[in-house]
């Protein structure tokens, strides 16, 4: 297990390194000139050159990259060119919105997908099972923006139960107000992601039904449903844990769109604004932080899966 953990950790670091290079190079090919943006309209070429020199933008790209990655080892993701604030500090502030939104969205997706996915598989061939399967297929194809707008119309406009946009200025000092502001965005992401996960849970459950140990349990006197619940669901759970790691990436992508729709001051909305403003150091730090988060979740999922799955331990 120690050797496996070290190997996975080395791959995690390699993935971060490759991601950092790709992020750095990709941002350098974007159109526009940050020096011209900072200097403003009507600035002279001399003024723009002075800004490039002050910010180090006139140095060779390898030197700029090594300076940036060197700061990363000190926990420094850079400083915003436009505001002069630390990227780490701004990420920490915006994470107070994005992280709870992601956790709540994931919980909603699991609560929707796991019981309904299992029920859909157990009722295969019946009207209820077919209806759940068709409903999941339909919801999985719904654009997340459209789903969010429909939820706003129903729960904010018609019923008036929840706020349509915004986040309390006091933040989490008023927990109930902050939670109410995140319910509709989390429902939007959770329902769409949950529909995608439901199809996988259904497929994994149907596969478990056909396993020999489930049929053996049924032959010993258990009903098919009892054999599935007692012996098949643990196997389904192992598969679901793996897929949940992949769902995190989908939730992050959904958060970028949903934070714009619901005017939430999170990392996704900040990222979109910084890309438009060509604030390269800040965008670099934000993209690397999000990429690192996804890779770390995958690393943790791999370790958890190996710890709880005896088949992988025996194979090693």
Image (cartoon, rainbow, N blue to C red):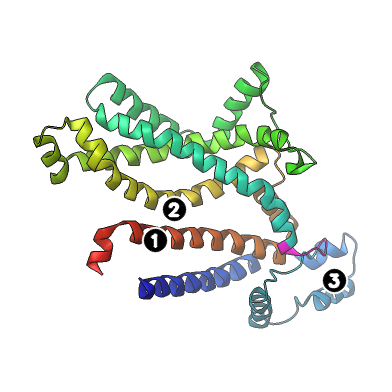
Q: Quadrant of residue 179?
A: top right
Q: Nearer the viewer, residue 299 or 67?
A: 299
Could you tell whether 307 is left or right of 101 in the image?
left
Which comes sooner in the sequence, label 1 or label 3? 3
Which comes sooner in the sequence, label 2 or label 1? 2
Give the x, y percent position of residue 201: 33, 40
The CA span between labels 2 and 1 is 9 Å
Give the x, y percent position of residue 276: 71, 54
Most common SS among magenta residues: loop
Give the x, y percent position of residue 123: 26, 26
Mark 3 surroundings: few (<14), some (14-19) or many (≥20) residues within 10 A: some
Label annotation for residue 245: 2
Mark 1 secondary-structure assignment: helix
Judge depth for marks 1 and 3 and give the one in front: 1
Mark 2 surroundings: few (<14), some (14-19) or many (≥20) residues within 10 A: some
Residue 37's place in the image compared with 176, above or below, is below
Quadrant of the snapshot with the C terminus: bottom left
Label annotation for residue 302: 1
Range drawn in magenta: 82-88
Q: Is 266 within the magenta?
A: no
Tell me whether the residue at label 2 lies in contact with that at label 1, contact meaning CB atoms closer than 8 angstroms. yes
The CA span between labels 1 and 3 is 49 Å
Judge depth for marks 2 and 3 and give the one in front: 2
Residue 272 appears in the rendering: no
Mark 2 secondary-structure assignment: helix
Label annotation for residue 294: none
Mark 3 secondary-structure assignment: helix
The CA span between labels 2 and 3 is 45 Å
Give the x, y percent position of residue 220: 10, 36
Q: Quadrant of residue 61?
A: bottom right
What residue does disc 3 label?
48
Which comes sooner in the sequence, label 2 or label 3? 3
């Amino acid at each position: 297990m120690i050797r496996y953990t070290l190997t996975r950790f080395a791959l995690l670091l390699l993935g971060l390194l490759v991601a950092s290079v790709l992020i750095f190079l990709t941002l350098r090919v974007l159109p526009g000139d940050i020096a011209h943006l900072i200097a403003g309209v009507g600035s002279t070429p001399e003024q723009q050159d002075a800004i490039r020199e002050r910010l180090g933008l006139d140095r060779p790209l390898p030197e700029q990259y090594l300076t940036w990655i060197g700061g990363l080892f000190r926990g420094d993701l850079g400083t915003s060119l436009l505001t002069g604030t630390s990227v780490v500090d701004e990420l920490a502030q915006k994470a107070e919105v994005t992280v709870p939104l992601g956790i709540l969205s994931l919980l909603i997706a699991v609560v929707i997908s796991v019981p309904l996915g299992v029920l859909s598989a157990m009722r295969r061939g019946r009207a209820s099972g077919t209806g759940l399967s068709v409903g999941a297929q339909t919801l999985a194809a719904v654009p997340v923006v459209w789903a969010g707008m429909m939820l706003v119309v129903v729960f904010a406009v018609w019923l008036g139960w929840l706020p349509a946009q915004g986040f309390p200025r006091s933040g989490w000092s008023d927990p109930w107000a902050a939670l109410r502001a995140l319910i509709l965005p989390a429902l939007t992401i959770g329902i769409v992601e949950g529909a995608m996960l439901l199809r996988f849970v259904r497929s994994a459950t149907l596969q478990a039904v056909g396993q020999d140990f489930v049929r053996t349990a049924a032959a010993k006197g258990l009903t098919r449903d009892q054999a599935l619940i007692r012996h098949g669901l643990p196997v389904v759970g192992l598969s679901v844990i793996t897929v949940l790691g992949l769902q995190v990436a989908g939730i992050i992508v959904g958060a970028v769109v949903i934070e714009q729709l619901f005017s939430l001051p999170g990392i996704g909305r900040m990222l979109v604004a910084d890309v438009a403003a060509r604030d390269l150091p800040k965008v670099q730090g934000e993209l690397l932080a999000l990429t690192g988060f996804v890779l770390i979740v995958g690393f943790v999922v791999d370790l958890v899966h190996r710890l709880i799955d005896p088949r992988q331990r025996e194979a090693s």
